[in-house]
Each structure stands twice: as C-alpha cells, then as structure tokens.
C-alpha cells in the first residue's frame, strides 16, 4: 500500500526531476486578494503569474497546496460526512507551466506519472476533453494510445475553465479512474456520471485564451498549464479503497475518535466520525495559518466548521473536548510535511478546547430550543426560517448546523426564510453606517502609477532628498496645483518619507520649494502597489505638478519609530522563547510614541512571564549588538533562518533584518526576520524597553503594548514623581508613604465601623433625645404593632441584624426596614414569633418590593428580604407593607 506521505513526495519529486521548482504551500489565507475567502485551489498562489502581473524566477513549478472550501463560492461543508469524496480541507497536487511547455508536455507528464510511477492500469483510465479541443484529443491518442471511446468529449463548462468573466481561460482535460463494475455509476458524460465508479483524479487546464469584456476570446501569446490532482482522491485509488475516508490518514483519525468515544464508525455513527476527522484537520490548519474563531469573515467560517464537528461529537456522547484531544494525533500524522502544525500545536489544542467548552453550554440550550420548535410543527415538517435565525442569533447555530441536527428527523428548514431574517438584520445594521468618502478613488492612484511609475524610496539611507512633484490630489481628484490652506495628497518621484507598511506608521515632516512653499506632511500612505502619497496641508506658497521640491522627514520622530520597530522584533523572539514556538504575529502598530504587538496565544500572559519577556529584550538591548539589513533572494533568506512576518508578501528579493549579530554571522543573532521597515543600527540605540499592558484582542489573540527609549524612561519615573507629590501633600518623606497609608487605612476602617454602629443606633431609636425607642415609635396597624423605617446608607447585609434587634425590643409586632444605597432599595421584614403563624414576612416583603420596582422576595415567615431598583420610592414601600399588614391582620 502507498501511504499518503509517499504519494505527496513521489508527485513532487517526479516534477522536480522534470525541471520544476517545488514551491512550498502558500498559507490558507490568500494575501491581498479580497475575492477569495481561502486558498481554494493549487493555482491561487500563482494567479498574478498567470495574468502577467507578477514575474517569478522559474517558468515551471509543482506544489502540494493546502486548500479549504467551506464558505463563499467554494463551499463543500454541507456534503462532508455524507459522501465519499467531499472535504473542507484537502491537498491539491499540481504542476504549472508559465508560458513554457503546453498541452503535449502536460499530457505526457500526466500519463507517465499515473501509469508508470503510480502504476495505474491503462485499461482503467478514461479521459475527457472539451468538445472542440481536437488538439488534446489527438495528443491523448498519440501519447496514451487511448481509443476514441475512452476519450470523451464534454460540451459543458465542466471542461472549460476561466479565472473570471475576463482574463485567462481555456479548455480542460480530466483523467478518470474506473473502480470497477461492482461500484454504481457510469463514465463521464453519461447519465450515471455522478456515481462513485469513475472518479476524477487529475484535471489539466490549458490556458490558451484571454477573454475580453465583450466575450471575445483571443489566443494568448504564451499559453500556460495549470493542473490539479486531489491528494486524497489519488490516495484512495492507490490504496484500493473507494471512500477517501478509508485512506491511511483518515483511518488513523477515525480510529482515535472511535477509541475516545467508544462508538464504532458504522451505521448512523459513520458520518459523525467522518465529519469530526475532516473538520479537525481543517480547523487545525486554519488556526496554524493565523485564523481565529470569531463572528465574521474567515473566523466565522472556522467557527462554523468547529461547531459542526462539536455537535457531532456531542451526538457521539463525548463528554470532554474531543477535538482538542484528537489534535495531537493529527499533528503526529501531518506535522512532518507541515511543520507549522507542530509549532502551533499548543495554540490549536487550547483554541479547540476553549471553543468546545464555550459551545457545549450553548449547544445544550440550542438543542433544547430546537426540540421545542420541532414539537410545535404541524403537517409538512418544515422549521420556520425565523426560528432557525433565532437559533443562529441567540446560540450561534449556523443554518447548516440546524439542518444537520434535523436531518435524521426528516425535518426540513425554511432556508429562504432564514436568509430573509438575516438580510433584515443586516439592513438594520447598515442603516447607521455611512462611508466617509475622504480618500481618493483607487483609480486615481492607478492612473498616477501608470503615468509616473512607482515612487523610489530613499529613506533607508537619507533623511532628506530632492524630488519632482508627479501629481497633486485634492478632494479625491487630480489637480494641477494647490495653494496655502489646501489639504493635499502629493506624489513625488522619490522620497525619504517611509509610507505606512508592515505595521510601521508613515513619516511626518515637510516639503519645501520655490517661492517660500511649505507643505506640512502629517502622514504617508502607499497606494496602487508602489505610489507613496504624502498627506498634508499647504502652509505657505503654492505648488504645481512638475515643481522641484525638497523633502525632509521629522528626524526625531523617525528615530523613535526606528527604536519601536526594532523592539517589536526582539519582543517577537522573546515571546517565542518564553511562551513557545506556537506564537505567531497577528498584527502590529509601530508609531513614534508607542508600539503594539498582537500575537496568537490561547491564554493570558502571566505577570511572571511578562517580566521574563521584558528582561530578555532589555538584555539584548544592553549587549548593544549590531543590527544589519541586507537584500537577498527569498530562498537564501529562508535558508539563513529568517522568519517571515504576518501580513507581508515577499518577492524574489527580500530585506533581511538581523539583530544582535551581523548577517554573515546570523547563527549568533538573537533575531533574524524579513522586514521592509526602518531600524536602529545597534540594539543599544533602543535604550530601554518597558511593557505597559497585556490583554485580549479576540479569541486566541493577545496584545502587548510597550514603550522604548525616553518614553520608557519617563514611564518608569512616573511612580516616583507621584510618590514625591503624595509625600509632600502628606508631609512625610517618600520612604514613609507606606506607613502613612497603613495608618490612614486603619483610621478609615475604624471610622467606617463607628459610622455603621451609629446608623444602627439611629435605626433602633438610639443616638439622641430626638429619637424614640423602637417600642415607642411603633404604631398599631390592624391591632398589630408595626415599626417601619427608611434608613439611608445602611448596607443590605446589615438590615437583617437590625430587624432582629428591633423585634427583640418590640417584643410583639412587625418590623420593616428599607436601606437605600446608590439609588437602590434593600428591604427586610421581620415578624415576631407569636405572630408568625398568622402573618408571613414573605408576603409583606413582596408587597414592599413591588413598590420599588422589584420582583419577588424570599425567606421564612419570621424573616424575609427583597430588593428593588427605585430607592426614591422607599417610603411608598413602607406604606405598601403597612397596607398589606392591615389587610392580613384584620
């Protein structure tokens, strides 16, 4: 039997031997592509190469690409568990040609690999071609020797691929494997093609046309190849099974799930085990690639996947978080091929455990509500969309989870009604939102780049430079000039100003020119992939397109920003050392006055850990080691151990930052990372590093805020300054502050105690000649002595004791005291023992509670307590208790 690992390796090595660059899998989160939720195909990382927007150092490539299809246009979630081939996460094996070999080379390589290296019998293979693609049909006949009946022509879009409405497109050719006549299904193109007998194992896309907006297709000057082979599908074929979930990887995961739940994978329990295995894999890889569960975007899709698996685990009787316990099994199986799983294992386990524990309570409540709704159903058995939406809105049940839960009961869900309720909620949310419209339309910046090109950045070396104004934008539109008082966005051919990127804030400074021109620059942004936009206001003079100008940054601000940026790299490394290799950067802010660093970690960082992190960073600062940046090929940078940072896309050449040692001696460096920002020259230039805060950003993401340099020094001195000020006010030396506070705290507690005692005396009629003893103040109500008082400032915890004391003095009767604090009322009613058989304190206190906006009240016949939010109506409560007493005592 050929293992999944062997198949992956065999595929990549086959194409490596044929001159292909073996490219590592890209992350599941596509960089800078808002059209895609996740990487969903092997060609996604090469999209810009196919369109010509990006050049690579190679023209042939092969990869095993991580893919997720569980949201948006590509969504296989509902089918997972109930078919033999659907997955949320899968690996796509692929080979690619960027204007190099074409149909003949692709078909020859594919046929050689599947028949010779993989050893599939030729008589079990059938291929499809687009119905007009005579070239492909002829090549299959020539290379593979296939007869016409096993070269099936397909006229539908299944065999014609397009990147979008416009752009590269072309016919496809697919290779199918025949499992045998004992499996239901027919060949491709037949009415029974959806059966499991013939399974597609490889799709070859021949990109040979470009489609224009008019619909016209013209031949590309350099046709390309994009192929995709599902690793799980080919593994099933080579391991002689007809269900992807019977391959070695899934057998291992499902066996572990069976062992942990005690429920065999058969009958009605088979789909749940398949769902758990698949969704665990998808969840773990998404978490490892930086996605965290949330209620929007990618995080919401992850949460849906996790919760669907958790519902099935609940149905199998799992009492402890099952996915968290299964995660190490997955990492052991796939960690060698994908080391990011190993690094992120602690984060994966803790995220799964936290979500599962959180969802368990919601699941129990939601399923109870679902049961109640189903019991209401009459004929037709369709759950109303409004009820399904209520489950989503209140308990976080996505529609597919509700549909899954009702599947076995034969109950349908009104999906249209659900979507209508969802749309109504979104419409209400949008009503309060309006776009600012402050920035120029993106088309303006692309036009500028088209005419003037990208801006040359000089700021790694220079703080000031000469340049020529390329464009002026006012109010979102190109303008020929700007005058004093105008808010402007200026583009210059070259600049020392750093544009906001990689978390580092843009520079501030000034642009000067002839005629006394002065433009105060507050920020710099990067637009259209390389146009530096200087944002500011014309303070003096006027500026026109084509004017020569002098640009100068605020050096002090840049110096402080450099220190903060360099410190984030030291912090990143220290976090990994103290917390573990699972720590991954999730975002950052590097400004001149502070730094902020977001990172993946499943729990709060303890005070001791923060102190150790701070100590390590400052130790590197004190060593005053060299800080060096150098441009080198990306592959060389990775080989040197450089770490790529979150949210950055890297070209063939990258800037490598080494801190603590020169790049030629990078093994001795404390930190080696890829970074395009500006940095100090030696670690000692940072001077000092102080963590000021640590907290949660979202589930599984923590944030550290810190200061460096002079700001850090002033922060550390602030407590001493405050201490000196307090000491002066208290007329003691700073060293005596602690003793002084202890003394004053003791005095405060004593005074509070005395105040409480005085209030109690006043409540009971003591404390002066004007106050009457309890027995004298009581009045007869329905033949029963009644004492009712409103007591300002008496705490609820003291009321019961006061009522007991008053009862003793009263000997026979009813006592009602109401304490008022912070506008709220606390009630206590006591009935002496001789009356409790005919009068209940509970009934009386409830009457009083209603008067102050409270509900209920509880206790015993001789003592009951309650509360209410409206302390201003305390006297009304006394009157209500008196009225209830009169009614009951009569």
Image: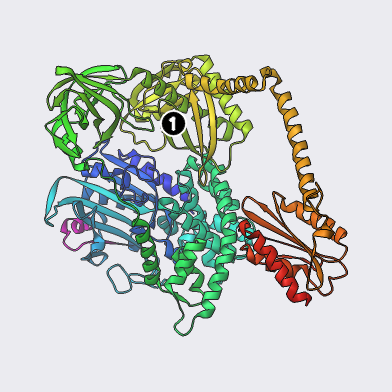
Q: Is residue 81 visible?
A: no
Coloration mode: rainbow
The quarter of the displayed image where residue 723 is located:
top right
- Asked if residue 87 lies left or right of residue 501, the reply is right
**Does residue 357 show up magenta in the picture?**
no
Q: What residue sits 48% from the left and 15% below the top?
A: 684
Between 794 and 458, the residue placed more toward the observer is 794
Q: Is residue 62 visible?
A: yes
Q: Quadrant of the C terminus?
A: bottom right
Between 1 and 595, the residue placed more toward the observer is 595
Query: What residue does disc 1 label?
Result: 643
**Percent position (x, y) of residue 435?**
29, 48
Secondary structure type for disc 1:
loop
**Does residue 135 show up magenta in the picture?**
yes
Between 118 and 397, the residue placed more toward the observer is 397
**Percent position (x, y) of residue 627?**
43, 18
**How many numbered tags mark residues here?**
1
| Vertical side of 68 occupied by 702: above or below | above
Q: What residue sits 54% from the left and 28% below the top?
A: 691
| Vertical side of 24 occupied by 817: above or below | below
Q: Which residues are magenta?
A: 127-141
**Percent position (x, y) of residue 743?**
75, 28
- Count neighbours of disc 1 (C-alpha within 10 A) and say few if under 14, some if 14 to 19, many if 20 or more: some
**Percent position (x, y) of residue 839?**
80, 72
- Asked if residue 366 lies left or right of residue 751, the reply is left
| Vertical side of 393 occupied by 732: above or below | above
Q: What residue sits 82% from the left and 57% below the top?
A: 774
In this view, the residue farthest toward the front is 769
Between 318 and 260, the residue placed more toward the observer is 318
């Amino acid at each position: 039997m050929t293992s999944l690992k062997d198949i992956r390796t065999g595929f990549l090595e086959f194409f490596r031997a044929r001159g292909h660059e073996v490219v590592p899998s890209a992350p599941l989160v596509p960089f800078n592509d808002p059209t895609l939720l996740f990487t969903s195909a092997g060609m996604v990382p090469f999209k810009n190469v196919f369109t010509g927007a990006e050049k690579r150092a190679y023209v042939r490539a092969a990869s095993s690409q991580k893919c997720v299809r569980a949201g948006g246009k590509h969504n296989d979630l509902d089918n997972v568990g109930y078919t033999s081939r659907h997955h949320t996460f899968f690996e796509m094996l692929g080979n690619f040609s960027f204007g190099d070999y074409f149909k003949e080379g692709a078909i020859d390589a594919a046929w050689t690999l599947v028949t010779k290296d993989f050893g599939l019998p030729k008589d079990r293979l059938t291929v499809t071609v687009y119905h007009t693609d005579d070239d492909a049909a002829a090549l299959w006949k020539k290379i593979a020797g296939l007869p016409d009946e096993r070269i099936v022509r397909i006229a539908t879009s299944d065999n014609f691929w397009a990147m979008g409405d416009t752009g590269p497109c072309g016919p496809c050719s697919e290779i199918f494997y025949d499992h045998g006549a004992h499996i239901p299904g027919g060949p491709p193109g037949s009415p029974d093609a959806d059966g499991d007998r013939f399974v597609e194992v490889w799709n070859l896309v021949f990109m040979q046309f470009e489609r224009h907006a008019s619909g016209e297709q013209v031949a590309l000057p350099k046709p390309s190849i994009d192929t995709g082979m599902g690793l799980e599908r080919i593994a099933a074929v080579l391991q002689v099974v007809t269900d992807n979930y019977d391959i070695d990887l899934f057998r291992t995961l499902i066996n572990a799930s069976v062992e942990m739940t005690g429920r065999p994978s058969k009958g009605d329990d088979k789909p749940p085990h398949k769902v758990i295995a698949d969704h665990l894999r998808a969840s773990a890889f998404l978490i490892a690639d930086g996605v965290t569960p949330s209620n929007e975007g990618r995080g919401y899709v992850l949460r849906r996947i996790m919760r669907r698996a958790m519902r099935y685990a609940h149905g199998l009787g799992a009492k402890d978080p099952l996915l968290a316990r299964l995660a190490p099994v997955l990492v052991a199986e796939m960690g060698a091929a994908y080391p990011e799983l190993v690094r992120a294992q602690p984060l994966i386990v803790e995220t799964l455990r936290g979500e599962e524990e959180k969802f368990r309570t919601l699941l129990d409540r939601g399923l109870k509500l679902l049961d109640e709704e189903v019991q209401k159903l009459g004929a037709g058995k369709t759950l109303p969309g409004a009820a399904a939406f209520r489950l989503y809105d209140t308990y976080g049940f996505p529609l597919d989870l509700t549909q899954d839960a009702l599947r076995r009961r034969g109950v349908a869900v009104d999906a249209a009604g659900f979507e209508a309720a969802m749309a109504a909620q979104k419409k209400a949310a949008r009503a309060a939102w309006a776009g600012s419209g402050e920035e120029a339309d993106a088309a303006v910046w692309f036009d500028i780049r088209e005419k003037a090109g990208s801006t040359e950045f000089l700021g790694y070396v220079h703080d000031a430079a000469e340049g020529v104004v390329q464009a002026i934008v006012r109010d979102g539109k190109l303008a020929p000039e700007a005058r004093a008082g105008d808010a402007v966005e200026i583009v210059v051919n070259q600049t020392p100003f750093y544009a906001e990127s990689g978390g580092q804030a843009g520079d501030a400074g000034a642009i000067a020119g002839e005629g006394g021109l002065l433009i105060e620059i507050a920020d710099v942004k990067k637009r259209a992939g390389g146009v530096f936009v200087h944002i500011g206001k014309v303070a003096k003079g006027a500026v026109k397109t084509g004017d020569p100008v002098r640009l100068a940054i605020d050096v002090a601000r840049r110096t402080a920003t450099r220190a903060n940026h360099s410190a984030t790299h030291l912090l990143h490394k220290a976090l990994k050392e103290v917390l573990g290799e699972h720590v991954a950067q999730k975002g950052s802010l590097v400004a001149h006055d502070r730094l902020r660093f977001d990172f993946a970690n499943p729990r709060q960082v303890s005070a001791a850990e923060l102190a150790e992190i701070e100590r390590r960073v400052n130790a590197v600062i004190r060593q005053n080691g060299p800080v060096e940046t150098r441009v080198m090929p990306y592959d060389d940078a990775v080989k040197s151990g450089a770490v790529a940072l979150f949210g950055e896309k890297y070209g063939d050449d990258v800037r490598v930052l080494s801190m603590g040692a020169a790049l030629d001696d990078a093994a001795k460096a404390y930190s080696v990372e890829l970074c395009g920002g500006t940095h100090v020259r030696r670690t000692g230039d940072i001077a000092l590093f102080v963590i000021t805060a640590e907290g949660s950003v979202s589930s599984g993401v923590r944030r550290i805020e810190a200061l460096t340099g002079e700001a850090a020094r002033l922060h550390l001195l602030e407590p001493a300054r405050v201490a000196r000020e307090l000491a002066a006010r208290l007329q003691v030396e700073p060293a005596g502050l602690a003793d002084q506070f202890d003394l004053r705290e003791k005095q405060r507690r004593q005074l509070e105690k005395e105040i409480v005692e005085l209030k109690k005396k006043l409540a009971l009629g003591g404390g002066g000649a004007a106050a009457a003893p309890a027995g004298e103040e009581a009045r007869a109500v329905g033949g029963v002595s009644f004492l009712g008082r409103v007591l300002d400032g008496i705490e609820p915890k003291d009321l019961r004791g006061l009522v007991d004391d008053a009862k003793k003095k009263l000997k026979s009767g009813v006592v009602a005291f109401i304490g008022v604090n912070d506008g709220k009322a606390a009630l206590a009613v006591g009935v002496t023992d001789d009356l409790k058989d005919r009068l209940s304190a509970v009934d009386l206190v409830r009457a009083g509670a209603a008067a102050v906006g409270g509900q209920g009240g509880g206790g015993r016949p001789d003592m009951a307590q309650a509360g209410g939010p409206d302390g201003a109506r305390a006297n009304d409560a006394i009157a209500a208790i008196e009225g209830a007493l009169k009614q009951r005592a009569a």
